[in-house]
Image (cartoon, rainbow, N blue to C red):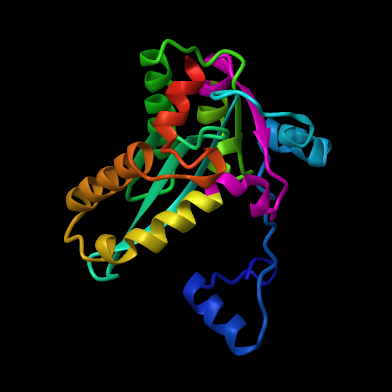
Amino acid sequence: MEQYGEIVNHKLLLRLLKLWGLGLKRKIKPKKRSWIKRVLDFLGKRANLLFSLTVDKVFQVIVSDITEIPYCQGRKKAYLCVHLDYLGKMILGWELGKHPDASLVLASFNMARNKLKRLGKSSQGIVFHQDQGSVYTGAEYTTATLEAGGTLSFSRKGEPGDNAVNESFFSRLKEEQRDVFFEAKDLWELEKLVKRAIDYYNFKRYHTSIGIVPPWEFTKEALG
């Protein structure tokens, strides 16, 4: 030890510390919060724009979330991200992947933007609402959303009810398709099954909240 002029192997020192019930104090550097996390902490519930917004048009608000989907008899799991129109209930973008990361939400977001373009609509002025997970508050997603002309809205921490539209969709999807997804042998097969389920949801499944019609029929009527 330095003050006694002795050199001690670090492994020996660790063993001695463990034997004596001692430990070296470590300075744990707190993780730096992103700028948007600091803004959200300041805003509190005001960050949820849905509290003060009357949604009466399709593509006025698009909500997004991620859910876990077990497959391969439960031995594997994938993650599904969707971007869903708040009023018309139509899934505009979705992506399935092995990890709930930024690339997953960006792929879903970009599909939604492309779908809007095909329908002759711009992302300008659309409110994009999601939870405060790191993939949604990170630089990649927030930058992409703002550069597209969108406005960001966030649920309160620990309040899944603030995104009830997505919660309802995921609950319905899992209730109806859980056994089908469970039997998928690989991610490629699961992706085909998810696509089929979303197509059915968009174009054939009736929704009481939009007049007992499928989301696409309601959206097409709303667009004139």
The image position of residue 156, as x and y in percent, is 72, 46
Magenta residues (range): 144-166
Q: Which of 163/88 is in front?
A: 88
Q: Which of 220/48 is in front?
A: 220
Question: Can residue 141 be seen?
Answer: yes
Residue under the point 57% across and 45% down = 165
Quadrant location of the N terminus?
bottom right
- How many numbered discs? 0
Residue under the point 59% across and 84% down = 18
Q: Is residue 64 magenta?
A: no
Depicted 70 relative to depicted 82: above or below: below
Q: Quadrant of residue 131?
A: top right
Residue farthest to the bottom, as pictured: 19
Q: Quadrant of residue 33?
A: top right
Depicted 193 relative to depicted 102: above or below: below
Q: Quadrant of residue 109?
A: top left
Q: Would residue 132 appear left or right of 93 to someone viewing this image? A: right
The image position of residue 65, as x and y in percent, is 51, 44
The image position of residue 198, as x and y in percent, is 33, 43
Q: Would residue 81 appear left or right of 186 to someone viewing this image? A: right
Depicted 152 relative to depicted 148: above or below: below
Residue under the point 37% across and 27% down = 111
Q: Is residue 160 magenta?
A: yes
Residue under the point 29% across and 67% down = 179
The image position of residue 176, as x and y in percent, is 36, 60
Question: Can residue 91 be seen?
Answer: no
Q: Which of 179/153 is in front?
A: 179
Q: Would residue 76 appear left or right of 39 to someone viewing this image? A: left
Q: Which of 205/47 is in front?
A: 205
